[in-house]
Image (cartoon, rainbow, N blue to C red):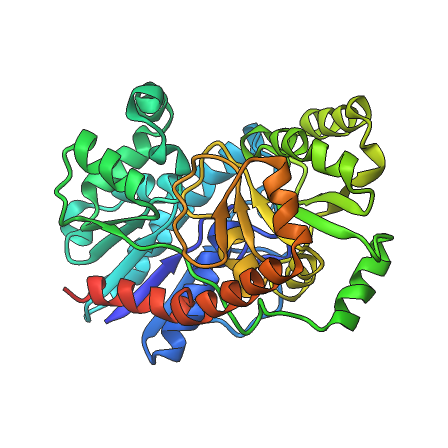
Amino acid sequence: MKIYEIGTGYTPVPARVSAATESVVEELTKAYMQMGCSVEIIDIASNDRAPNDLPITEVKVPSVFSKTDVALGLVHKLKRVVYSVCLAFRLRKILANEKERVVLHFHNQYNMFFFLKLVPKKIRSRFFLAYTNHNGMWSLPWNEVSGTLKKRYFQEIEAMKNADAVFVLNESMRRNIVGNLGLSAEKVVLIGNGVNTDVYRPLTDDEKNSIKENFGIRGKKIILQVGSVNENKGQMKVLEILTPALKKHSDLVYAFAGEIVSAEYHEKILADAVRLGVEKQVKYLGAFAPNEEMNGIYNIAHATVIASRYEGFPLVCVESLSAGVPVIVCGDMCVAVGDGCVCESDSEKISNIIYDSEKHGKLCAAARENAVKNLTWQSVAAKYYDRFGR
């Protein structure tokens, strides 16, 4: 069986700039290679690709669309369309020479939609089409999002209806898709994301202090939020929740990291910090490359908070746990990863988690142990492979 993991074209695989879905493609491919599987990545041609030894076949696009793009404007949408069209024709050529069982694993609605439109059914019906839905909006109550999904994600709906297997990241997504799109329960499979526990790992106190020194926060207790800076991620919500704790503990800092997708929202966060009188304890760290660089950022934290309005399965959660840093979910997201992760939105209780040394130490140990035992990419890849082989 030959597996083709399809890069989305958003950022190259592996990315110099962090991109969650691309990280999934990269880590699944590495895990398949360790399993001895035949696997290849099909991805956009780019000069921004990080050094790697992965088996990658590039799809060339006009140079204006080959640069890494983290904004979500018109150029981004055009890039998705152009890459998807070029991808479809490249896949058609590749598949013409394939005689073994082939799995095409898509991770983006544009990519699979145009593949379905541009590759004749007679050709594509010979191959197993898999689609992983990374869109956390599918986890929200159906009556709140059905109109938006049908209007803006009609390509994703068609992709899922034509896939041989659809993979989702949480149970709410599965219920919505099975219950409202008419897909069979057997076709929609729940498989969460994983983590590379060799890369995301606890660092020594000296290493942590060195990183803190670089940011001017040595000696501080850090509550960290990682994710693109925009309204969905909820940085302003976290700031509001943490303000009482920040005012009570002068050595506590709320730090957030990630690409600034909305400059206006970023400015609002900083303005809110001034309004609330905690601006000296609120710090934007910047955007960081995945793997070792990002692991250092997790390690300076006493806890990582997640407060998104919706997520599929945030890599932040498992990466933080693997680094030995507890995760605090401030909201109703469908995240169920076990030990080291707690749901809490009360400022006093959150600060107790940080300042109770014994309780905090146990949470840190439980987080790391949970990641190593239950959340590796090897275990995730094995589940995918098993379903591909049926």
Residue 228 seen in this snapshot:
no
Q: Residue at x 71, y 32 (%)?
A: 244
Query: Which x, y percent locates residue 233?
Result: 56, 35
Query: Image check: 169 left or right of 65?
Result: left
Query: Image check: 200 left or right of 147?
Result: right
Query: Which x, y percent locates residue 61?
Result: 51, 48
Query: Image check: 224 left or right of 364?
Result: right
| Number of marks present in the image shown | 0
In the image shown, does 389 or 139 lie closer to the viewer? 139
Q: Is residue 312 above or below residue 277?
A: below
Q: Is residue 363 above or below residue 124?
A: below
Query: Which x, y percent locates residue 370?
Result: 44, 66
Query: Which x, y percent locates residue 103?
Result: 25, 61
Q: Residue at x 64, y 56 (%)?
A: 48
Give residue 339's quadrant in the image.
bottom left
In the image shown, does 247 or 201 lie closer to the viewer? 247
Q: Residue at x 14, y 33 (%)?
A: 182
In the image shown, does 198 or 340 lie closer to the viewer? 340
Residue 214 seen in this snapshot:
yes
Name the image quarter holding the C terminus: bottom left
Give residue 184's quadrant in the image.
top left
Name the image quarter holding the N terminus: bottom left
